[in-house]
Image: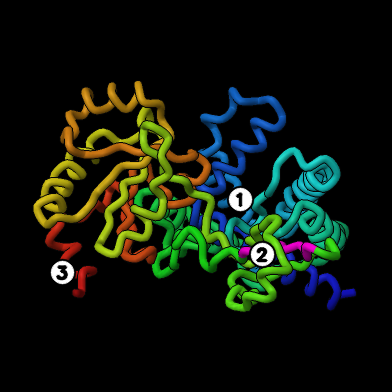
Amino acid sequence: MKFIRNFSRLFVGVVFIFSGIVKGVDPLGTAYRIEDYFIAYGVEWAIPLSLILSVFLCALEFILGISLLFNVWIRRTAWLLFPIMIFFTLLTMVDAIWEPVPDCGCFGDAIKLSNPETFYKNIVLIVFTAIIFYGRKKFKFPRASGYEFFILASFGIGFLWFSFYNLDHLPLTDFREWKVGNDMDPENGEPKIYLIFRNIESGEEEEYLSPDFPWQDSVWMAKWEFVDQRMDDSEVIKAHELIIESGEGEDLTREFICNPDYQFIVVAYNLQKTDHDAFGKINTLFVEVDKHDQSLIVITSSLKEEVTEFRRLVQTDLHLDFYYGDDAVLKTMVRANPGLILFKNGVVIAKWHYNDLPAYEVVKEEFMKD
């Protein structure tokens, strides 16, 4: 039983530490998932608390994991851990049955689990957690009690610094599809076009992959007539769900994302919540980018009227163009409001938080190699 208890302690501890870190590296992403739960359960009034809860819950999960790993304060930890696991097991059971939210985000964006998979994972964890809880009095810390507080306090302070650093800058590790180096060409591959012909005499129909049909055979062409065509895009791989639209609704996604020259894109998903001071730097950057005949645009999910009012408030350059996209997609592109992304030929070259917006000369020296 001692081996089983220690294995349970180490296993649950490692899982909690890993889970806390991969969510703590992206506190905003975790906050967005908490918002999904608030909306699903009809408590939208609590949405302003989502970021605070994100940092708190990630820190709590990490500290519980550290406590288990280092075998400190196990009795206190067990009294916290077991009820928490019961609550989240019941919550993920509801998710698995009714799916009020599409993704619980238990491992952030690092590991994607379906709602049923998350529930099964919690069933396994709660078994080991129960072993820890019922054997809590048999765990002994090998050193004086003062070390216990020192260990937990040190790791706790370190984790809070880690979380707030990732909030004030970009996540140290980006697990999303828009990370630096990824090719974000909207579609990789071409759809297949199939042509359907009917035999004039027999009425038999045949399907050919365009242009692989005997169009040069005059005898064959005399006996067969074109009927219809169909498109198969099952092999076309979509890199993302972003659609960049003009104010008139024109789809300009490929024009900007796949620009063969360097393309600067400012993502400000909500202009009412965006950092106004950052747009002073963005205006300065836009002037330099424009001088070099390159493109810098802003994408937002705000309404046209809000864009007009925002221009007036922050006095943006009148030549700086605003385009529109879905807020959920914009939030995944960069964890900042606003954030800056540099593209070339569809590839993400670099990303910046509004606290770290660079001067054009810095970008040119470090990222524009040709």
Cα separation, mark 1 vs mark 2, equals 57 Å
Query: For residue 359, which quarter of the picture?
Result: bottom left
| Residue 338 position within the rendered picture, expressed as x and y whole percent measured from the top left | 33, 43
Q: Is residue 199 magenta?
A: yes
> At 54% from the left edge and 68% from the top edge, which residue is drawn?
189
Q: Can you identify the residue that label 1 sits on? A: 60
Callout 2 amino acid:
Tyr
Number of residues whose C-alpha sits closer than 10 Å to that of mark 1, classed few (under 14), some (14–19) or many (20 or more) = some
Mark 3 or 2, nearer chain start: 2
**Relative to 189, is 301 on the left or the right?**
left
* Residue 51 seen in this snapshot: yes
Magenta highlight range: 193-200
Cα separation, mark 3 vs mark 2, equals 49 Å
| Residue 209 position within the rendered picture, expressed as x and y whole percent measured from the top left | 65, 71
> At 40% from the left edge and 26% from the top edge, which residue is drawn?
303
- Out of 234 and 262, give the one closest to the viewer: 234
Q: Can you identify the residue that label 2 sits on? A: 194
Identify the mark at residue 365; answer none if there is no mark: 3
**Relative to 134, is 252 on the left or the right?**
left
Callout 1 amino acid:
Leu
- Out of 90 and 41, give the one closest to the viewer: 41
Query: Which is more foreground, mark 1 or mark 3?
Result: 3
| Residue 89 position within the rendered picture, expressed as x and y whole percent measured from the top left | 81, 49
Q: Is residue 356 magenta?
A: no
| Residue 157 position within the rendered picture, expressed as x and y whole percent measured from the top left | 46, 55
Q: Secondary structure at mark 3?
A: helix
Image quadrant for the N terminus? bottom right
Callout 3 amino acid:
Glu
